[in-house]
Image: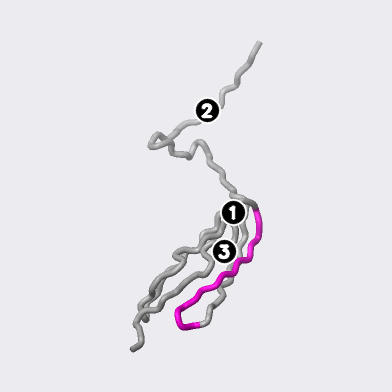
Amino acid sequence: MPSNEAKFKIPKKHVNFGVVVNPSNGLVSTGSQTSITIEVTPIELIKFYIRFGLKVLGQDEQEIHMTGEVIEPNLNILESEFNYGGVSILHQNNFILKIR
């Protein structure tokens, strides 16, 4: 009697340093879908290529390939537009300080 669920498994949960695949195993009902999360925690600015196996019970292992690039964040916070926990800065004045 055929099952109406498929078991899947990621043989190596930690694919590369800084890369984790979750969940590493589980069940999927026939006709449904599941999500697999790939978390990348970069430690340097790099381009990367990752591949890992996905095994469904009763089938050959499939390879999943993923490429990406870690870029330096470009963050610009203007003090005049930043909300300090509900206290907004409405005016910003520049003062000239002269020392004699």
Q: Which mark is residue 15?
A: 3
Instruction: Say few, some or many: other residues with alpha carbon within 10 Å of mark 1 (under 14 / 14 to 19 / 20 or more).
Output: some
The span from disc 2 to disc 1 (Cα, nearest Å) is 40 Å
Residue type marked 2: Asn
Q: Mark 1 or mark 3, which is nearer the start of the sequence? A: 3
- Quadrant in the picture for residue 48: bottom right
Q: Tell which circle, 2 or 3, labels the residue nearer the N-terminal end.
A: 3
Q: CA distance from mark 3 to mark 1?
A: 13 Å
Q: Look at the numbered disc 3 and give the secondary structure of its residue.
A: loop
Residue bearing the label numbered 1: 42
Q: Position of residue 2 (x, y in %)?
A: 36, 87
Q: How many marks?
A: 3
For the point 44% across and 65% down, which residue is it?
Answer: 23
Residue denoted by label 2? 93
Q: Residue furthest top?
A: 100
Q: Vertically, is 68 above or below 73?
A: below
Q: Magenta segment range? A: 45-59
Please, is residue 95 above or below residue 34 in the view?
Answer: above
Which quarter of the image is occupied by the C terminus? top right
Find out whether residue 28 is within the magenta segment: no
Q: Residue at x 59, y 69 (%)?
A: 51
Q: Is residue 18 above or below residue 28?
A: above
Measured as percent of width and height from the top left, residue 85 is found at: 40, 37
Seen in the picture, residue 4 relative to 21 is either above or below; the reply is below
